[in-house]
Image: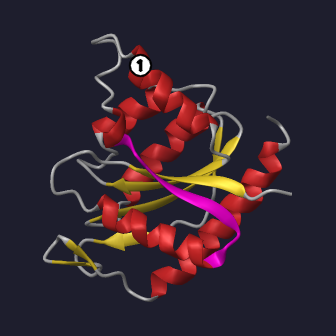
Amino acid sequence: MSKLNIGIILGSTREGRVSPQVGEWVKSIGDGRGDANYEIVDIADYKLPLLGEADATEQATAWNTKLAELDGFVFVVQEYNHSITAALKNALDYARDAWNNKAAGIVSYGSVGGARAAEHLRGILGELSVADVRVHPALSLFTDFENGSVFKPADLHLTNVNGMLDQVLAWSGALKTLR
């Protein structure tokens, strides 16, 4: 059986964001496992305008094509005003079928580990027929980021990332039989 393709979705597009650091950390852990093909998928690269405000046929096609290539996801989610970013919500809304019957894990960060954003994302994923897994690495802005900008995760998060990836791969493999 071929390896599953897991996209690590960076959930922010703002200048100076730290999600690329977190995403690369998750990818390096995944790559070290050797059990799937892990890939960073940066929503900023797709330049999706607000849904319905402009003709985005080209961007939406590219976005949906990328999502369709993936068997599962890890969302890197930062908490903005107790929720996910507008850019991530917009990107989620630009696809429908490409999300269906796939699994996702969430790695969040914020003042309370991004827990409130992760919970909002879980509700949205349910509507998109994405099965979110239980294990959830939650990173603190106070202890896992130096000066709020340099990612230095505590060692304890490695166990949670591996547990999350175990679940994402198990569920992604099982759900692949439905697609």
The magenta stretch is 33-43
Q: Secondary structure at mark 1?
A: helix
Q: Position of residue 87 (x, y in %)?
A: 31, 37
Q: Return the residue nearer the eye: 30 or 79.
A: 30
Give the image location of residue 156, x and y in percent.
Answer: 47, 87
Q: Residue at x 65, y 53 (%)?
A: 5
Between 120 and 18, the residue placed more toward the observer is: 18
Q: Residue pushed farthest left?
A: 147
Task: From the image, tell me which residue sits under label 1.
Answer: 58
Is 10 magenta? The answer is no
Q: Amino acid at mark 1?
A: Glu
Is residue 97 shown above or below 25?
above
Spot occupied by residue 24 in the image (x, y as percentages of width and height): 41, 67
Q: Is residue 48 visible?
A: yes
Binning the other alpha carbons within 10 Å of mark 1 as few (below 14), some (14 to 19) or many (20 upward) gives few
Q: Residue furthest bottom?
A: 155
Q: Quadrant of the N terminus?
A: bottom right
Please give the name of the residue rendered at 54% of the width and 37% of the height, measured from the top-left corner: 66
Apparent side of residue 53 relative to residue 93 in the rendered image (left or right):
left
- Give the left or right position of residue 133, taking residue 56 as reference: right
Q: Position of residue 117 (x, y in %)?
A: 37, 51
Residue 137 visible in this rendered orientation of the protein: no
- Residue 165 occupies quadrant: bottom right
In this rendering, position of residue 9 left or right of residue 161: left
Q: What secondary structure characterizes most of the magenta part?
A: strand
When the figure is inspected, residue 66 is found, relative to residue 56, above or below; the finding is below
